[in-house]
Amino acid sequence: MTAARPARITAAGWGWRYAGRRAPAVNDVSFTIEPGQRVLLLGASGAGKSTLLAGMAGLLGGADEGDETGTLLVDGERAEAHRGRVGLVLQDPDAGVVLSKVGDDVAFGCENLGVPASEIPSRVAEALDAVGLDVPPSRATKALSGGQKQRLALAGVLAMRPGVLLLDEPTANLDPDGVREVRDAVERAVRETGATLVVIEHRTAVWADLMDRVVVVGADGGLLADGTPAEVFSHHGAALAAAGVWVPGHPVDVPVLAAAALGAPAAVAASALSVSRDGRTIVRAGLDLAVPRAAATVITGPNGAGKSTLALTLAGLLPEAAGLVEAAPELAGRSGRRPSKWTSRELLTRIGTVFQEPEHQFLASTVQGELAIGPRSRGVDPAAVDEVVDELLERLHLAPLAAANPFTLSGGQKRRLSVATVLADAPPVIVLDEPTFGQDRRGWIELVQLLQSEIAAGTTVVAVTHDEDVLRHLGGHRIELGAPVHAGVSP
């Protein structure tokens, strides 16, 4: 597979402040990335890594969207002049899917660039081969797993033959096999194309050996470190870990909860349960399980195994396709013990849910207002609401962003806010889908400690996760789902 000439990226005192925000997202960043270099871009959550990547891709817009300082150039020109030559793969696999068939989706970028129609089929075939996505071009994109969708997004970018490949958290929410698939696909692609590579990733150990340079962005501006992976991690490891960067060989210092007691009373239990997203296609069937009270239960398994669907069913947000989900007698609502039959107000005070996509649960125009919605709707005294909100803002390092719009936060900040909104309601059961994804080291520690304190106070926690450290530190009871099962259509 061929590529455009690898590009040089130069930043000189560059910064960006989004419209409506007081503080810049990125400030006073200077570096030169040479053509063909492979760079791991690190920094604490909210340090502006994604903004910097969007700037390299020329996607930040004009003066009406924010204020720019300094310069950020691709081969001596503004990045906007190189759209198509700079390829960006986003964090969310579904965000990169445009069309319903694999071949059409990979061809989409080429068609927009005006590539001759006769040349596109060979580009599509080369790109799919480069990322190791061995499926027919006619395969429905909705039938792909998370790891396959991420490779599909990468193939769509490679088909345009960019000189720069930018990846923003490309393995977020993927199971271990999916992480390996995407990492291997990227290595194969850059080896064959020679493209300049910049990757944002919290999983530093996965990518470090592929990179020849590590650049660390400071939360208060400038760079914290810049050098080879060995130099940066050996000379600056302790300081970077303290700043929130995941550094290989620096484990977290967090107590490990004792394992959940066998035979503990169940907060929620399921019998002969079948689950489905659409009410027709059964994802899992014949599940018998119990969620022990005042303990953590962790749902694990490969992408596509039905983990999120099971969690949403236990939380009462999806009806049982078959079988029964029942809560403990003390949680019963007016219509009984089945969460799927409860009203939204009954659910709010009994089972809180943190969705995989944080944006799906934001309602207010400010972070502070978002945290206050639940308590206010329950008639909590205003002074008590303020106390709860202030405590959560401090604990999750969101206080400086209290007046910010939730949709303008970084991915890690959005996740912390989504968890905090549920904690503000203090329900006895909390269901979280990938609670630690996109978190820097400090944010991960704070979230895990917060969940530990909730468990110690008697809260029942259910977490869908690929993070084995979450299971270990929460002392979680594991529900392991095997490979995806296509049980068919319900009667």
Image (cartoon, rainbow, N blue to C red):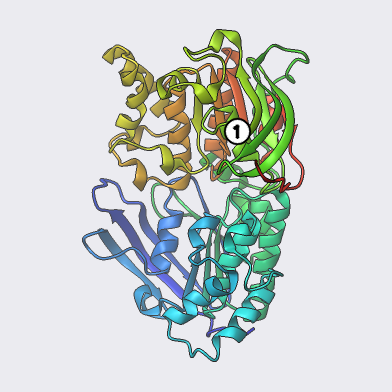
Taking depth in this image into account, of 331 and 90 the one nearest to the observer is 331
In the rendered view, does 329 fall on the left or right side of 206? left
Question: What is the count of numbered marks?
Answer: 1
Q: Is residue 12 above or below residue 236?
A: below
Q: Residue 334, how many percent across, how many down?
A: 47, 12
User: Residue at left 46%, top 79%?
Assistant: 85
Q: Which residue is mark 1?
A: 311
Above or below 385: residue 32:
below
Judged from this view, the residue extending furthest toward the front is: 491
What type is the residue that disc 1 sits on? Ala
Q: Position of residue 319 (x, y in %)?
A: 56, 31
Q: In which quarter of the view is residue 15 placed?
A: bottom left
430, above or below 222, in the image: above
For this orientation, the residue located farthest to the left is 64
Residue that appears at 72% across and 25% down: 289
Classify the position of the C terminus by image quarter.
top right
